[in-house]
Image (cartoon, helix red, strand yellow):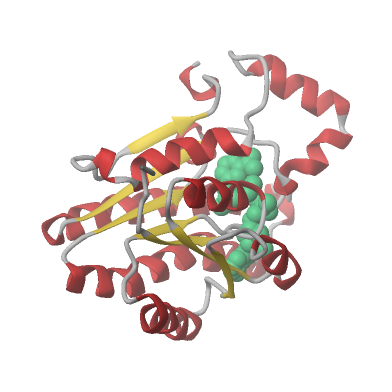
Amino acid sequence: MGRLDNKIAIITGGASGMGASMAELFTKEGAIVIAADINEENLAKISELENVEGMKLDVSSDENWAAFTKAVIDKYGRIDILINNAGISSQKSPQDITDQDWAIMHKINSFGPFLGIKHVSKYMKEAGKGSIVNTSSYTAIIGSGLNSYTASKGSLRAIARAAAAELGKSNIRVNTVFPGVIETPMTANIGQFKEAMDMLVRATPMGRLGQPEEVANAILFLASDEASYITGGELVIDGGYSAQ
Ligand SMILES: NC(=O)c1ccc[n+]([C@@H]2O[C@H](COP(=O)([O-])OP(=O)(O)OC[C@H]3O[C@@H](n4cnc5c(N)ncnc54)[C@H](O)[C@@H]3O)[C@@H](O)[C@H]2O)c1
């Protein structure tokens, strides 16, 4: 028996990195996964997995979310799990950040998950249950990086806690994970700078970076019925980085 048998799960940013790893793991555990992403090339690849359907979605668009969730309901009848995982990052220094940089970052990393909660919770309320997990970042906890990324992930943390408080009475759980540096396409550029990489590894108590599967495993637990009394939960997955 799988840990997600018969669950219908949406994973945003499901075509790459941690999202793709979750798609693979969730289907192994019995779920049907809708991988929602803007990258059509990667969506086609992830759709080759059994029980994964890739669907195009721009998480920052209210209209996109309305049409997308309706299409999922029309085809699958319900949404049991939403993983708000799509995101972008930026290495810009505080002096270089413009209004537009700030707006785009927040539109995708903060408004996007808010929209996901808004649209999916409507159907979850009708069903009387649901589980939502958000991917924030350790930067939201330890004050790492004076930039729009850190701010957007802190905003997501606040949204998630408010959603947990609001939706608990509807039997919808909302939890959040805070990954450290995980080896995915998003962080691939760090590998080019040996000095930066060595510094990060040295600064991590476990002496290495994280792998997408290690985040996927934690999210699997929070998404599943095994976490039935956990809501408003915050789980750090960073090899001990933020414990220092
Ligand atoms: N990799 C890390 O070290 C790390 C650490 C902490 C948090 N995170 C967060 O984890 C999440 C997954 O990141 P990843 O490392 O797997 O990166 P990734 O770049 O491999 O995957 C991100 C995915 O999000 C998609 N995406 C971007 N904008 C979108 C939009 N508007 N609509 C729909 N999809 C969109 C991309 O196409 C991509 O497939 C992100 O939210 C990221 O901020 C990553």
Task: Tell me: 231 left or right of 109.
Answer: left
Task: Tell me: 241 left or right of 16.
Answer: left
- State the image quarter where residue 57 is shown: bottom right
Position in image of residue 53 (x %, y %): 56, 69
Residue located at (70% from left, 37% from top): 183
Residue located at (11% from left, 58% from top): 169
- State the image quarter where residue 67 is shown: bottom left
Position in image of residue 17 (x %, y %): 66, 48
Give the image quadrant in which the ligand numbered 1 is located. bottom right
- Compared with 68, 84 (above or below) is above
Residue located at (35% from left, 58% from top): 6
Position in image of residue 114 (x %, y %): 39, 65
Residue located at (44% from left, 46% from top): 29
Of 170 and 114, nearer the camera is 170
Count numbered badges in the picture. Answer: 0
Residue 147 visible (yes or no): no
- Compared with 162, 79 (above or below) is below
Of 205 and 42, nearer the camera is 42
Task: Tell me: 168 left or right of 162.
Answer: left
Picture quarter with the N terminus: top left
Residue 101 visible (yes or no): yes
- Compared with 58, 106 (above or below) is above
Of 15 and 153, nearer the camera is 15
Of 119 and 49, nearer the camera is 49
Task: Tell me: 211 left or right of 32.
Answer: right
In this view, the residue farthest toward the front is: 1
